[in-house]
Image (spheres, rainbow, N blue to C red):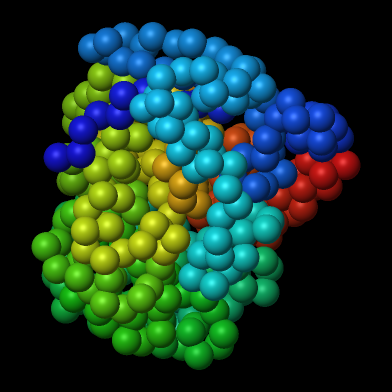
C-alpha cells in the first residue's frame, strides 16, 4: 500500500481573466495545470487523525520556502508545485487547451438518467451521433448501469450491448470511451475502436484490467468509488473525503505505473455520488483543485445526479439540468479539464460563456 503523503498542497486564491493574467505576469500566481484558472496561494495540509493542520502561504512565500526549508521538504514542495502547474498533455490525442465534454451513451435498460431510451443499437448510435453534432469531444459508451443499487450484468451481455455501438461510432469518427469495469469488455471494445477505458473501479475491480489497458496503449479514466454499486450508498464512511480520495488516487497511480501505464495516459474522476453522501460530495466538489497535485487531467461527472435533487426541490433526473450546469461550472472554476454530461448542447453553451468570461 502506498504511504499516506506527508502533506497535501491545495491551491487557493483561484482566479481567471485579467486578474489571473496580471497576477501570473507579476509572479504572484501560477496557472493551474496550465489552464485558464490561476492560483495565488496554497494550503499545506497535514493530517492528525481526522483533523487537518493547515498552513496557508502565498505562492511567492511558498517558493521562497523551498529555498530555506530542509532539503526533503523543499524537494517535495517543488515536485507538488510542478504537478499543480505543468500543462496537461493530450488525453487520448485530445488537446486539453480548453474544457472538453464527454457525452454519455447508456446502452442499458436501467440507467438512472435515461431509463433505457437508448438500449437498442440503432437508438444508441443515433444518440451518439447527435451528441457529436452538438459538441461532444468524447462519447462514453456503457452497457452496465452503475447507479446505486444496480445489479451486475453478465459479461457476454455487456459485450453484446456495447460492441456494435462502439464500432459504429468509432467508424463515424468519434473518440470513443468504454465505460466498464470488466477486462473482457475492455478488450472487446478496444478491438472495436474505443480509445479510452473509463473504469469506476480504477482498474482494481478485475485482476486483468490493468494488463489490458497497459498492452493496448489506451487512455484510462480512474474513478473513485467506495464499495460497489449494489451497496455503495448504504453507509459510506470517510475520515476526510477529499484527502482519502487523494490517497486512493496516489495508490492507484502507483499501481498503474507498476503495470506499465504512464501517468500521461491517465485522467482522474473523484466519483461524485459513488459511495458518498451529500456532505462528502460537496466537500470533494469544493476541493477539486487539490487533485491537480497528482499531475493528471481531471474528469468530473455530476450530470443529473441525485444529490442535485436532494439539494434542490427533489427533481427527477430529467429536471436536473440547472443543477448539473452549476456543478459543472464549479468544476471548471477549479481547473477540471473534462466534464462528463448527458445534456451536451446545453453544457457546451454554458462552457462557451464561461470561457468567454474566464479569458476576458
Identity of the residue drawn at 41% across and 47% down: 269
Identity of the residue drawn at 36% across and 76% down: 217
List the single residue furthest toward the left.
207
Relative to residue 144, is residue 92 drawn left or right? right
Identity of the residue drawn at 27% across and 39% down: 248
* Residue 110 place in picture, x, y as percent: 31, 59
Which quadrant of the rendered structure holds the C terminus?
A: top right
Camera-nearest residue between 346 and 264: 264
Camera-nearest residue between 227 and 117: 227
Identity of the residue drawn at 31% across and 41% down: 250
Camera-nearest residue between 339 and 250: 250
* Residue 101 place in picture, x, y as percent: 59, 59
Relative to residue 277, is residue 93 drawn left or right? right
Relative to residue 291, is residue 150 drawn left or right? left
Relative to residue 294, is residue 276 drawn left or right? left
Q: Is residue 331 visible?
A: no
* Residue 220 place in picture, x, y as percent: 37, 63
Relative to 348, say whether 56 is above or below.
above
Looking at the rendered structure, the number of numbered marks drawn on it comes to: 0
Q: Quadrant of residue 8?
A: top left
Relative to 184, say whether 5 is above or below.
above
Q: Quadrant of residue 151?
A: bottom left
Q: Is residue 191 visible?
A: yes
* Residue 350 place in picture, x, y as percent: 73, 48
Camera-nearest residue between 160 and 48: 48
Which quadrant of the rendered structure holds the N terminus?
A: top left
Amino acid at each position: 500500500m502506498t504511504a499516506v503523503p506527508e502533506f497535501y498542497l491545495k491551491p487557493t486564491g483561484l482566479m481567471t481573466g485579467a486578474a489571473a493574467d496580471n497576477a501570473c505576469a507579476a509572479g504572484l500566481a501560477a496557472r493551474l495545470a496550465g489552464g485558464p484558472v490561476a492560483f495565488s496561494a496554497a494550503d499545506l495540509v497535514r493530517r492528525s487523525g481526522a483533523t487537518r493542520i493547515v498552513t496557508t502561504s502565498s505562492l511567492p512565500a511558498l517558493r521562497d520556502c523551498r529555498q530555506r526549508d530542509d532539503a526533503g521538504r523543499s524537494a517535495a514542495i517543488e515536485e507538488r508545485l510542478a504537478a499543480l502547474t505543468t500543462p496537461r498533455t493530450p488525453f487520448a490525442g485530445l488537446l486539453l487547451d480548453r474544457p472538453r465534454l464527454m457525452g454519455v451513451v447508456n446502452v442499458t435498460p436501467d440507467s438512472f438518467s435515461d431509463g433505457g431510451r437508448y438500449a437498442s443499437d440503432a437508438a444508441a448510435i443515433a444518440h451518439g451521433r447527435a451528441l457529436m453534432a452538438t459538441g461532444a469531444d468524447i462519447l462514453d459508451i456503457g452497457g452496465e448501469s452503475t447507479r446505486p443499487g444496480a445489479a451486475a450484468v453478465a459479461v457476454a451481455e455487456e459485450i453484446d450491448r456495447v460492441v456494435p455501438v462502439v464500432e459504429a461510432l468509432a467508424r463515424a469518427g468519434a473518440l470513443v470511451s468504454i465505460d466498464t469495469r470488466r477486462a473482457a469488455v475492455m478488450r472487446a471494445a478496444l478491438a472495436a475502436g474505443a480509445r479510452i477505458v473509463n473504469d469506476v473501479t480504477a482498474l482494481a475491480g478485475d485482476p486483468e484490467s490493468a494488463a489490458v489497458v497497459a498492452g493496448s496503449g489506451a487512455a484510462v479514466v480512474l474513478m473513485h468509488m467506495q464499495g460497489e454499486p449494489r451497496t455503495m450508498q448504504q453507509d459510506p464512511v470517510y475520515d476526510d473525503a477529499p484527502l482519502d480520495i487523494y490517497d486512493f488516487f496516489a495508490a492507484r497511480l502507483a499501481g498503474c505505473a507498476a503495470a506499465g501505464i504512464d501517468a500521461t495516459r491517465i485522467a482522474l474522476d473523484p466519483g461524485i455520488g459513488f459511495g458518498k453522501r451529500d456532505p462528502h460530495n460537496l466537500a470533494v466538489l469544493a476541493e477539486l483543485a487539490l487533485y491537480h497535485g497528482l499531475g493528471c487531467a481531471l474528469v468530473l461527472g455530476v450530470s443529473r445526479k441525485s444529490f442535485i435533487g436532494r439539494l434542490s426541490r427533489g427533481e427527477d433526473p430529467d429536471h436536473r439540468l440547472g443543477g448539473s450546469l452549476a456543478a459543472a461550472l464549479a468544476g471548471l472554476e477549479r481547473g477540471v479539464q473534462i466534464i462528463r454530461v448527458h445534456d451536451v448542447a446545453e453544457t457546451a453553451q454554458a462552457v462557451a460563456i464561461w470561457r468567454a468570461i474566464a479569458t476576458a
